[in-house]
Amino acid sequence: MTNKLRIFYIICALAVTVMFSLGNTTQGALLTEFSAYYGIGAFEQSFISAAASFGMAAGLCPLLSGWIKITKNLLYVIAVGAVALSFSLIGMMPAYPLFLCLYALLGMAFGFIDAIGSSLIADVSAPEKLQRNMGMLHAFYGIGGILGPFMIRFAAGFSSGGAGTGGDGVRLTAYLLAGLAAVLLIINGLGFAQIKRKSPATLVVPARLNLSELAGFIRAGAVPLLLTTALYGAYLNVITFRMAQYISVDFKSDTLAALSLSVFWAGIVISRLTAPRIKLNLKFFIVGGMALTTVITTIGVITGSAVGMCVAAFFAGIVGGAVIPMCIGELCRLIPSNTLLASSSALLLLYVVQLAGALVAGAFTPGDNLGVGLYFAAAYALLGAVSAAFYRSGEQGNAART
């Protein structure tokens, strides 16, 4: 593969990842508008996040099994188109059951983007640059997380009743995201045509699941990293879905609500850009980062302050933000012959646990004390630290390559 094609892969993946992040941010940043428009309580609100996670998991099942006979590159382009379609229909604010179905479709597209983007980065990266490039890819997701809350809140303010009432602002936000996805669809489509002509060898069809290969992957020590990835994903899901609403409702501050998400993702971006460049023991970093995430998040809720929660969110992002890309990078290292298996299996489990985690947190979060949901997030991070403690690298890590 030529250097220009490598650069193209990376630039496209970074741009699409930002769009993916902006779209995913709507679940939390527009939650107040959604709940006002549809008249739903705390438990029913969790269905939105659960629908997106369900779609992500459902989409990855055929991808992981190899049932989809479409090249990774083309499937990536199709997923971007599905995002444009989903947001166009979400902007119509249909009946709540259909609205949830559209978020599931959106989640399916996001699942393809997430798994294939990570796989493509692993495919085009030299071994010594894998963790750095994977961190950069996921850092761009964080950049979308920084920009998203304020951009989305700004667009949501253009409703007839103002931000927080639902209606026209939500529609405008959805249509803007649909337009962004449409632009990226054109760029990726043109780029795919160039790759097809200049480097047809890069058009890889996802392989059918090989049970012996999967067994070797598991024997190589993948299970603790898979569980850690999933549990941090559950933590991330509850934080991004519940924290802004907690601050907005309990402390009556939409500004600090948006700021909390932005500073959280700012911490994550710092972590993902710097941690892979620091020579730390992987297991030590992940266990320590998850444990500190638990402590800092708990302290943030205990302060009973919107400012305290914002400060805690920033530092929680710094200490744990690099967990997912570093785990996925290490999983891809365990099985370099099939990086899509590594990324898809990690993200499939992540989405399933996210779905269950969101429903559990929603079911036990009282409407008059939304901060309780954040304690569930802290518990997920603690379980992730325990899981990571069982990871063994070294000789076991070579099993999938022999």
Image (cartoon, rainbow, N blue to C red):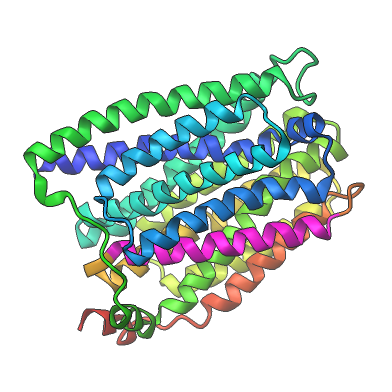
Q: Quadrant of residue 249?
A: top right
Residue 64 visible, this angle = yes
Would you say residue 1 is visible in this rendering? Answer: no
User: How would you classify the magenta stretch by its main secondary structure?
Assistant: helix
Residue at the spot x=27%, y=43% of the render? Answer: 74
Residue plotted at (46% across, 60% down): 347
- Could you tell me residue 165's position as x and y percent? 80, 24
Q: Which stretch did the figure color magenta? A: 339-365
Along the line of sight, which residue is nearer the eye, 161 or 129? 161
Direction from residue 303 to residue 352 in the image, left or right: left
Q: Is residue 80 above or below residue 119?
A: above
How far from the left and from the top, in percent, is residue 270? Answer: 48, 46
- Which residue is at 51% across, 26% downward? 177
- 79 vs 159, left or right, is left
- Furthest-right residue in this view: 368
* Residue 320 among magenta residues: no
Give the side of residue 189 with respect to residue 109, left or right.
left
**What residue sits 62% from the left and 35% below the top?**
26
Q: Nearer the viewer, residue 36 or 62?
A: 62
Task: Name the quadrant of the C terminus.
Answer: bottom left
- Left or right, 270 with respect to 190, comes to right
Quarter occupied by residue 196: top left
Q: Is residue 367 above or below residue 38?
A: below
**Of residues 78 and 279, the one drawn nearer to the viewer in this rendering:** 78
Residue 173 locus on image (x, y percent): 59, 23
- Is 364 covered by the magenta stretch? yes
